[in-house]
Image (spheres, rainbow, N blue to C red):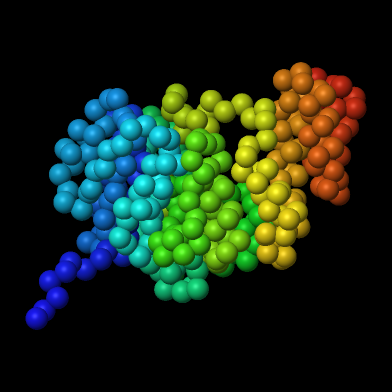
Amino acid sequence: MANDAPALPRWSVVIPLHNKQEFIGATLRSACHQAGGSDVEVIVIDDGSTDESAARVSEVGDKRIRLIQQPNAGVAAARNRGIQEASGEWVVFLDADDILHPQALDAYREMAERFPQAQLLGGKDVRIDSAALSASALPPLPKPLPVDLVPNFPDLFVRRGMPFSSSSVAIRRQFLISHGLSFPEGESMGEDLDLWLRATERGELACTPAGIVSYRVGLPTSLMGSYRGLELLPVWRRLRARATSGDVPQPLRASSLRLVAEMEITLSRRLAKAGQRASAWRHLWAARSACTGHRWWVTLAALAAGSKWLLLKLR
């Protein structure tokens, strides 16, 4: 007897949704209108929206979209639910107000074929003001796609910044399951970084500098826009604890601690600008392992001089 079970999709696009009725339609269409997009399912986790977001999802009318509604529990819980519901080989994360490049899945496919050992695939996000995004179009992706393995993610982060965002990354579903990886629930800042760091401690990352998602900026409800950064996020405290305890693989320990130190320096500068000089000194001392770097000494000089002008110049 023939097996009538439907074939599993290769890609599961997971979209956490909370009160994004203005944007979710365009986001869903970008996920569904992919080159070679028949091999995809789209899982929307409506995390207790109180606007018309759920109705907008239904209006798209694509059978590949599955809407799951739950009481509000936060973005980490919504993404974790999406992982649990996914059936594809790869979980592709996409925020409910961002736009996938029409060749994004093709880009992920090419990356996976060239580096089959990679467990994570990442691409650049192109940050566009929300008011202009509807009129913006990402250029066609280059062929062949530039792709590199990233042997030391914390080191790359320190030197160049984040190479991908929560809307431009794909992870093998079985890799997540086998390592028990999930987003830390109850947190709304840095919870995605926590997963990327723990995942790259266990598996290989392949990245492209090509832009594969349009990332909205300038939204009044953006968490990043409202965050003032006057405390060290749990993601950095946990990374330091793993690195000092030996849970981070030895080749990544020094760079992991350097990454935390750079975040301490940034926090020291923010605290100084806010007039919290004692806390600024404390965090700069915690970052003393980075004293070989220019940023640490400039921050020390600014704090020692007590120069408001110099402090305002620091970023």
Residue 158 visible somewhere in the drawing: no
Which residue is rendered at x = 62% and y = 48% of the image?
Answer: 161
The C terminus: image quadrant? top right
Which residue is rendered at x = 47% and y = 29% of the image?
Answer: 222
**Which corner quadrant of the image does residue 272 belong to?**
top right
Residue 131 visible somewhere in the drawing: yes
Instruction: Please state the horizontal and vertical placement of residue 294, each as a whole percent of the image.
Output: 82, 44
Instruction: Please state the horizontal and vertical placement of residue 11, each as a whole percent of the image.
Output: 32, 60
The N terminus: image quadrant? bottom left
Which residue is rendered at x = 32% and y = 62% of the image?
Answer: 88
Task: Tell whether 12 sits left or right of 278.
Answer: left
Task: Tell whether 180 sits left or right of 197.
Answer: left
Which residue is rendered at x = 29% and y = 49% of the image?
Answer: 43
Relative height, residue 79 to residue 17 (above, below): below
Relative height, residue 27 to residue 33 (above, below): above
Q: Nearer the viewer, residue 139 or 107?
A: 107
Q: Tell which residue pokes out farthest to the bottom in this image.
A: 1
Q: Nearer the viewer, residue 115 or 243?
A: 243
Instruction: Please state the horizontal and vertical placement of residue 302, each as a whole percent of the image.
Output: 85, 29
**Which corner quadrant of the image does residue 279 belong to?**
top right
Q: Nearer the viewer, residue 73 or 232?
A: 73
Relative height, residue 69 to residue 125 (above, below): above
Q: Count of labels shown?
A: 0
Q: Nearer the viewer, residue 59 or 43?
A: 43
